Structures are given as structure tokens and as C-alpha cells.
Image (cartoon, helix red, strand yellow):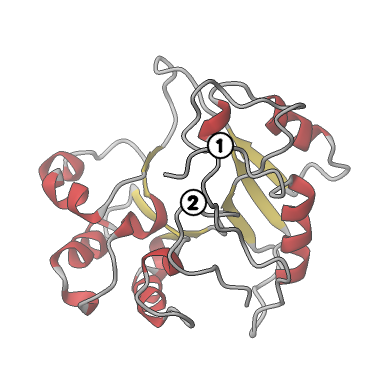
Amino acid sequence: MARAGEEIYEWDKQPRMPVPPPPPRSCDCQFHIYASPQNFPPRPNPPYPPIESATFAQAQRMHRAIGFERGVIVHSAIYGSDHRLLLHALESLDDRDRYRGIGIVDDGVSGWHARLHVNGDDLLNNSDLLRSLKDVPMVIDHFGHVGFEGGMERPVIRWVLDILKQENWWMMISNGNRDSRMEVGWDDASRMADHSSKRRRNGSSGTAIGRTHSGPSE
């Protein structure tokens, strides 16, 4: 994880409309926003410094360019439970139907879905526990960081595709380029996305920390 003073790889600043374009009302189901630490300071000892150029205005510009009409701001862990930046962004909107926010709550709050930000081995090592969860909506973040070498028959990929057959399981399709072995195209990630097309949520993730390859712009 990047620390203060270390390099942070950012998104393509010149995004383009994909071909074919996304369908009407497409939604970016996950992106982070940041701002000047003077105005919105991060919590003490954050896992990485704020990416000041990744503002809500930049995210909106990206969405217009790539044809996303809606989005979900996922509150960054660097701000802890201080939601001032998230609220400021949402309150700035003229059309509040286009964006929603996800915050960070105390452990005692119930009634939410669970997101698994894990590596592939974590899924296999905790398989019995995870398969026993039937009543909680579960979302595997960023393809589960399974890695794509070896194709669709690798045990961890087969595990993910199998668990997605359960009605309470979903997978976030984002950051595929981060785990891809390919410099461009990321066909290995696309194959897994295609196999999970009925149980997926799409997200740009905005900027990515520790990214192997730069993110797609089309």
C-alpha cells in the first residue's frame, strides 16, 4: 500500500467513449474521491495519502466521457468515519438521482451487505465459512484479486464462478488490469467478466493504488 511520498499511479486523464458505448443509465458502482487535506483532512495514520487530483469533478468528467450516467461514491478508508467530503459531494449535485454514496459505519450497525476485499487464496482458505453465508448479500471486490494466469480452470477462479451461482453472491468488475498479465487489452480479465456476466457489478475504482498497468480508457 502506498505511503506518503510514494508514487501513486493514477487513471488515464483523457478517457474516451468505449466502442460499443455502454447502455443507457449505465452505473459506475464504485469509485473513490479525494480533496485537499487542508479542507478535508484524512484520519490519523491513513493507509495512503489523499490523491488530490481525484476529485468528484474529475470523476464526473470521466463519467461523461465514457458514457456512464450514474455512479456510487465509495467513501475512502483514509477518511475513516468522517463523511464530510462524501456529503459535500452529494450536496453539490443539482440532480441527486444520478449519484449515491457508501459510507463507513460502526461495527454495531446491521442490515448492510458485506464486501470482501481479499486475495484469491483467502477465498479458498475460508471456503467453508463463506459458503455457509446464505442470508447476507456478499460482494467479492475487484475480481477477488485472483490473478488470471492459467485461465478459467484454475481452482480459485472455478470457486468464484461457482459461488456466484448462489443468489446472495455478486462480484465487482473493476481493477482487472491491476492483476492482468497483459499490457493492453486485458483479455484475461475480460474472459472472467464474461463468465460472471449475470452476477456482477461494474466499477471504475477511480484511481488505483499499487497498480501494475494503467487503467483502461476505452
Above or below, 19 relative to 152: below
Measured as percent of width and height from the top left, residue 150 is found at 20, 77
Mark whose residue sits in front, 2 or 1:
2
In the image shown, does 60 or 34 lie closer to the viewer? 34
Q: Is residue 218 left or right of residue 169?
A: right
Q: CA distance from mark 2 to mark 1?
A: 12 Å
Residue 108 lies, in percent from the top left, at 40, 14
Q: Which residue is mark 2?
A: 209
Q: Quadrant of the C terminus?
A: bottom right
Residue drawn at the location 74% of the way across and 46% of the way down: 56
- Residue 157 is marked as none
Which amino acid does the dot numbered 2 rest on?
Ile
Name which residue type carries label 1: Ser
104 lies above or below 177: above
User: Is residue 155 shown above or below 78?
Assistant: below
SS of the residue under disc 2? loop
Q: Is residue 38 left or right of residue 30?
A: right
Q: Quarter of the image holding residue 117?
A: top left
| Secondary structure of the residue carrying numbered label 1 | loop
Q: Which residue is mark 1?
A: 76
Q: Quadrant of residue 102?
A: top right
